[in-house]
Amino acid sequence: MAHVIIMPKQGQSVENCIISEFKKKVGDTVKVGDVLFGYETDKATFEEESQVEGTVLAIFWADGDEIPVLQNVMVIGNPGESFEEFKPVAAAGIPSETHRPSASSLPPAAPAGPSHSSGHGRPEVSVGIPASADIVPDAPVSPRARMLAEQKGVNTAQVAGSGPGGRIIARDVEAAALAQGHLTGLAKARMAAGGFVSPGSGSGLAGAVKGADLKVWKPSHTEGLPGEGTDYEVVKLSNMRKLIAKSMYNSLQNSAQLTHMLGADARQVQALRKKAKKALEEGRLDVNITINDFVCYAVIRALQAFPNVNSHCLGDAMRLFKCVNLGLAVDTERGLMVPAVAHAEEMDIVTLSRSLKKVADDSKKGSINPDLLSPEAASFTVSNLGGFGVEWFTPIINLPQSGILGVGTIVPRPKMVDGEYRFVPYMALSFTYDHRAIDGGEATRFLKKVAEEIENLDIDF
């Protein structure tokens, strides 16, 4: 009996997953527990293990394809069994970018199916043909990618296809549209017609590219292709890097961001850190409480006094949280992740420290629950670059959140102490807020409150 393998649903907020790599190919024998393919959500990676034994009869997608959850991915069964009933169908009227195995790659006993067309006279490409990052003249374009190109004003002749055989698929068009910048109606129409290239930003309102800003595009297939050259190398962005780039770009384009900066006297928090370290060494604590834990603890208390900051800006409405769901920016090998710790206001410093460490470790291992990485999961985010020696920076808001606090390194600064100036340790705080939701005065008062909470923390161990 043939068994269909579907794309798992990892969390309620995940709608699509990207295939990172197929571990099995058509014709391979599969045992229970074998890894069939790796896949990733927005920022977490997973592996799908087989629950059945048999032979891989069909694979409907290729490495790098973005697939809706619960969609059929591959079929495992006995050689010669039919798999036609499991072939994915188009969703919401948009043709799916389905990749059928070629007849030659099927098991010997499996019947070779008829050739399929993409709907534009171009045959679908089989799994097993490596994707190309080069711009290929007259490269095939998937139906969905063609539709997106018309909507976004993208000339597919200028797009490097990442699908099998250089095929241009939807995500290639999305990336090209992002690089083009915001186009006016005229510029979009000219770009779609071909013969022009966008400079990325133009003379229109908010940097919009107008028709007059477009430059004539002269393709040349005799010059070195992207990736070749003596002074440089062109490499494709990873799926993770593309997602991060899109998120950061959208944040800056769709909100009114401003950053206030203030220093906080760090003597008290450094003293607490020493006490916590001593308690750990003496066995009175079983968790290493860091300065960042103390800062987050202070931020939580400040947020409870400023509900407009502990919020989501929804354009014409505000979502004001009664609890503090704290997001923590975590640097991982795959890119920046921001997992959330729910109901952090209910935690003491030890519980908070454990919770922050757990979400950070899970993010680095790639085992974090995708729901915790959703921007909607957190009501406010803290990003600490102090460990890297960064003093001041302007963090970017994780929309729809209304603000984010950047924490810098501690440096000595002069301060009046007991009637004379002395050098004391100061912690740099950078608060970026959405001016649509928060006024400058309120932002300043909140930042001052954070500094006061840091300077006056009183915790016993």
Image (spheres, rainbow, N blue to C red):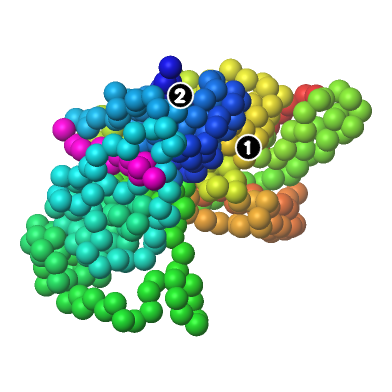
Main secondary-structure element of the magenta-colored stretch: loop
Q: Which residue is at the front of the view, 152 or 109?
A: 109
Identify the residue shown where x is 25% and y is 68%. Answer: 137
Residue 365, numbered circle: 1
Identify the residue shown where x is 42% and y is 32%. Answer: 109
Apparent side of residue 49 relative to residue 457 in the rendered image (left or right): left
Q: Quadrant of residue 106?
A: top left
Question: How many marks overall?
Answer: 2
Q: What kind of element bears circle 1?
A: helix
Residue 166, x across and y down, in percent: 33, 58
Q: Amino acid at mark 1?
A: Lys
Q: Which residues are magenta?
A: 93-104
Apparent side of residue 436 relative to residue 45 in the rendered image (left or right): left
Identify the residue position indicated by label 2 in the image: 77
Label 1, label 2: how many angstroms apart (C-alpha)? 33 Å
Decide which of tag 1 and tag 2 comes sooner along the chain: 2
Q: Quadrant of the C terminus?
A: top right
Residue 168, numbered circle: none
Residue 325, x across and y down, in percent: 50, 26
> Where 156 sits versus 111, above or below?
below
Q: Which residue is at the front of the view, 79 or 141?
A: 79
